[in-house]
Amino acid sequence: MKILVANIGSTSLKWRLFEFSDNVESLLHKGGFERVTDYAGAIEDCLRTLKEGGHIVTEQDLAAVGFKPVVAHGVSGCVRMDESVLAAMEVYNPIAPAHNPPYILGIRLFAERMPKVPLVGLFETSFYQWAAPASIRYGVPESWYEAGVRRWGFHGASHKFIAERSAELLGREDVAERARKLYAEGLKTRVNEPDLRVISCHLGGSSSLSGIRNGVAIGNSLGLSPQSGLPHNNRVGDLDAFAIPFVMRRLKLSLEDVEKQLCQEGGLKGISGVSNDLRDIRAAAERGDARAQLAQEVFVHSARHWIGAFLVELGGLDALVFTAGIGENRPEMRAGICAGLENFGLSLDAEANREVRAREAIVSASDSKVRVMVIPTNEELVVAREVRRLLERS
Ligand code: AMP
């Protein structure tokens, strides 16, 4: 069974083609295009690449195309991406303006191009379906909650991969197995004591932290929208709601101005005034740029804030995991985030940490009670596995 997982950005199309047979999972191909202006053309080029590489003969060889859509009103989990689901995504376009519109457009183009191939999405919110009611509720009137104003949590595929892989690396195959079967079996599988408590730090262009107990997420730093939690590349992160009416009146901004600035001129770019890429920000900080230095410090501060929140909620910690572009490649950010936590049983091996980039490794000191790990994420594999499960069920 061949499953293509398509990752749709506003100007990019990236894909991975997996093949599943009984117990063997293999990655047949991965590729992508940046700076896409003609999405239909990019889908055509993707299919041509797969055909020329001998991976498929026609698109009918694909058992399904899988997606990682962000958020839909009233829909989560792993579902067929039909028009009713796309309409539910459209309701939330205003809260995910950089994510939902390109996904909806891309999925419609896939549907036109290959009407007979099932299109299946694993929503990024799925991993948080068992979060406690108290952790998803904002202090808003009931009518706001009923309209859809609640914490969702995102990056679910990435954090789920980390839940599985970190448990394996800690020798807790029981927990890894539970995490792998989570969507299929819900919370039915029993797990042996003691608990396994993990905080997963997905730090990249878009960043979030998840608290995970026994393979199940207890919460995520992203709330209603992908503009919350830590400051992102150019999206704002957490903000007091009253900042918005204040700046609209004080700076005479329209609602459209505010939305645009929060989504495109905020985050690390807004603070640093340099770039939305932490590599450029670091270079500027090393040249003595104070705002660039501050942007890095705000990022570290925000990550530590959420580690503290989940550490208390979990009642302790067995592993702290770093993943994604910054988490995997920036040792000094990992060091900053882990600084001074010895009283919580966490100490880094400075030398090991300095050397690790984009590969799996344990970077905590040998006497650290909390294991600190770097694990490259594999969101597409999580999506492909769930798509396969859905196809085999139906
Ligand atoms: P992502 O969204 O996971 O691709 O992460 C993008 C962020 O990770 C950017 O802010 C980059 O600065 C950072 N990043 C990605 N790759 C590297 C690398 N090889 N070295 C340093 N930083 C990187």
Image: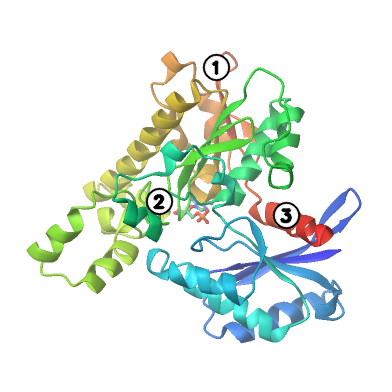
Observer-nearest of 393 and 251: 393
Q: Position of residue 184 (x, y in %)?
A: 73, 47
Observer-nearest of 177 and 321: 177
Residue farthest toward the left in the current orientation of the protein? 250
Question: Viewed as shown, does residue 130 lie left or right of 235?
Answer: right
Which tag is nearer the camera, tag 2 or tag 1? 2
Disc 1: which residue? 368
Q: Residue at x 54, y 45 (%)?
A: 128
Disc 2: which residue? 150
Q: Please, what is the three-letter code of the amino acid marked with disc 2?
A: Arg
Label 1 CA crowd tier, 10 Å (few <14, some 14–19, many 20+): some
Disc 3: which residue? 386
The image shows residue 351, relative to residue 38, as above or below, that is above
The image shows residue 62, relative to residue 229, as above or below, that is below
Label 3 CA crowd tier, 10 Å (few <14, some 14–19, many 20+): many
Q: Please, what is the three-letter code of the amino acid marked with disc 1?
A: Ser
Give the Cα separation between the discs numbered 3 and 2: 25 Å
Q: Position of residue 105 (x, y in %)?
A: 55, 79
- The earlier-in-sequence mark between 2 and 1 is 2
- When asked about the image quadrant of residue 139, the answer is top left
Residue farthest toward the right in the current orientation of the protein? 22
Q: Residue at x 18, y 72 (%)?
A: 254
- When asked about the image quadrant of residue 82, the answer is bottom right
Q: Position of residue 239 (x, y in %)?
A: 27, 50
Label 2 CA crowd tier, 10 Å (few <14, some 14–19, many 20+): some
Instruction: Check disc 3 and report its element: helix, strand or loop.
Output: helix
Task: Establish whether ligand 1 lies closer than 8 Å to the Cβ of label 1.
Answer: no
Is residue 10 something that shows in the picture? no
